[in-house]
Amino acid sequence: MFTNKANKIFQDVIAKYHVINTVDQSFDNPYSESDLLEHLLYRKCWIDTVQWHYEDIIRDPQIDPVAALTLKRKIDASNQDRTDMVEYIDSYFLEKYKHVTPKQNATINTESPAWGVDRLSILALKIYHMNEEATRKDASDAHRSACQTKLDILLEQRVDLSTAIDTLLSDIEKGDKYMKVYKQMKMYNDDELNPVLRGQK
């Protein structure tokens, strides 16, 4: 199943990041572009993992305002990269299923396959960090127990989400569903669409 592969790659990415555990580390994709899907999934989760830790850092109440502004710019750029990667993954699926003729009664899903993958990647990060809290030696028994309860729910959610994604891909392959991709058309990074940026020209 597709999500077996995706979940394994996401776990590998998160484990690799935490070997050094810094947002400033270099990125090396072990998958070449000839393994396009794996390459995209690995890159996608790496972006999510770095951004997860950006979000931790920027919430430091003692952060220097100038450093916070610099970090906010990095988060904005990361969000754009994240969106781009979702669209690349959807483009992969569009190409894969381009020869499928949807059935007359085929329906469209509320989200594209890659936006489901986006949620799956973030879920992998939640699971990793909740497991850390559930097993943290310096935490109270009550804290660990509460986090274990949350972790159990997250693990169940991963099963459900994985099943839903695999079912959607199967339905697209059979022609029971069809997919359309709407570009995100983000406006705040575009110096023609953001009135503040446009005013600086």
Image (spheres, rainbow, N blue to C red):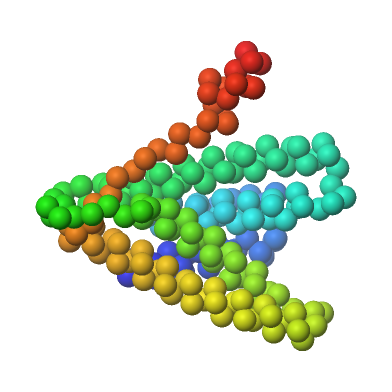
On screen, residue 144 versus residue 29, left or right, reads: right
Q: Nearer the viewer, residue 175 or 9?
A: 175
On screen, residue 14 versus residue 111, left or right, reads: right
The residue sitting at 59% across, 43% down in the picture is 78
Residue 100, image x, y percentages: 16, 52
On screen, residue 32 versus residue 82, left or right, reads: left
- The quadrant the N terminus occupies is bottom left
Residue 8, image x, y percentages: 46, 69
The residue sitting at 47% across, 55% down in the picture is 118
Give above or below for 156 relative to 183. Answer: below
- The quadrant the C terminus occupies is top right
Give above or below for 132 relative to 103. Answer: below
Residue 55, image x, y percentages: 69, 52
The residue sitting at 63% across, 60% down in the picture is 17
Q: Nearer the viewer, residue 183 or 53?
A: 183
Visible residue check, residue 32: no
On screen, residue 60 versus residue 49, left or right, reads: right
Q: Nearer the viewer, residue 28 or 8?
A: 8
The residue sitting at 42% across, 72% down in the picture is 160
